[in-house]
Amino acid sequence: MNIRKAVHAGYCWGVERALDIVTDTAAAHPSETVRTLGPIIHNSHVVQSLEEKGVQHVSGLDQLASGDTMIIRTHGVPPETYEQARAQGLNVVDATCPLVTLVQNKAKQLVQEGYHLVIFGNPKHPEVIGTIGHAGGKATVIERPEDVAKASFPKRVGVVVQTTQEIELLASFLAELTPRCKELKIFNTICNPTIERQEAARELAREVEVVIVVGGKNSSNTRHLAAVCREEGAIAHHIEDADELDPAWVKGCNNVGVTAGASTPGWLMDQVIERIQMIGDSA
C-alpha cells in the first residue's frame, strides 16, 4: 500500500500563531485565570490539551470575573464583545487570525462606501458572526450558490468571503449573483492557506483511490477538503483521529491519500498514517 500525504496539510500559520499566544499568555499569568472565549480552534484534541494545561474555554463573558484574562479565538468576535469585556474589567488578549481581521476590515470598508454587504459563508460560523458585527450588523449572508435566487439585492452590492470557503463554490456563487446586481464590488478573502490546502487535496485525490481527511467535525475548512476530494472522484472519509478509521475503507487499496485541515496538529495526521500502514501490512 502506497500512502501519500498532501503537500499542504495541517496547521496554518494563523493557528500556530494563536496557539503561541495562548501558551505565552498562560506562562505570563501563572497564578491568574486564563480562558479562551470559545474553543481557540476547531479541534477537540488541541482544546483538550490546553485544558489539561489549565487554559479552559468559556461560552460567554458571564463566566469570567474582573481581572481574568480572556483570549479571543482565531475566528474573531464582534466589536461589542471587546467593549463588554473591558467594561467587565477583563484583560483582553486578541488571537484573531490577521486574515480574518482583513475580512472584517474589508466588510467595514464596503459598508462605509455605501455598498450593501453580502458575506458568502456559513451564517452560524463565528467568523461570519464577527464580520457582521464589524460591518455594523447589516449584511446578507449567503451560504450556498443556489441560495442567491431566494434573496433580493439593492443596486450596489459588496462581497466578502469566509476565509475557509471553497474557491469553486465562490465562482458558482458569483455566477449567480452577478446578473442580479447593477454594481458589484468583490473582495476574495479566502485565505491563501485554504486555497493551498484545497489545491493540494485536489491533486492528491486525482492520484489515489481513497483520501482520509483528518480534522475536527466542526471545522469548516476540513469539511471543504473532503468535499473537493469527492469532486475529483476520490472516496473521502472525514475523521477526527485514528480511532475513527475503519480498516475496510483502505483494505485492498494500492494508493491511499491523507490530508488534514488547518486546525489539525501534525501528530494526529502521523497517527492516522501509522494506522493505515498497519492495516496495509496486515493485509
Image (cartoon, rainbow, N blue to C red):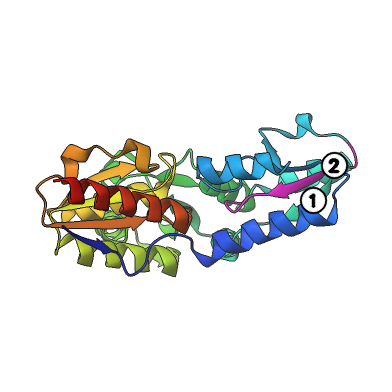
Residue highlighted by disc 1: 92
Amino acid at circle 2: Asp
Q: Which residues are magenta?
A: 66-76
Looking at the image, which residue is at 80% across and 41% down?
A: 84
The reply to whether the magenta stretch includes residue 24 is: no
Spatial CA span between label 1 and label 2: 9 Å
Asked which secondary structure carries label 1, the reply is: strand
Amino acid at circle 1: Val
Magenta portion: prevailing SS class? loop
Looking at the image, which residue is at 58% across and 58% down?
A: 104
Q: Note whether 159 is above or below 127 in the view shown.
A: below
Q: Are marks 1 and 2 in contact (CB under 8 Å)?
A: no
Give the x, y percent position of residue 274: 33, 52
Question: Looking at the image, which residue sits at the far front?
Answer: 282
Residue highlighted by disc 2: 68
> Sequence-wise, which precedes: disc 1 or disc 2?
2
The reply to whether the magenta stretch includes residue 71 is: yes
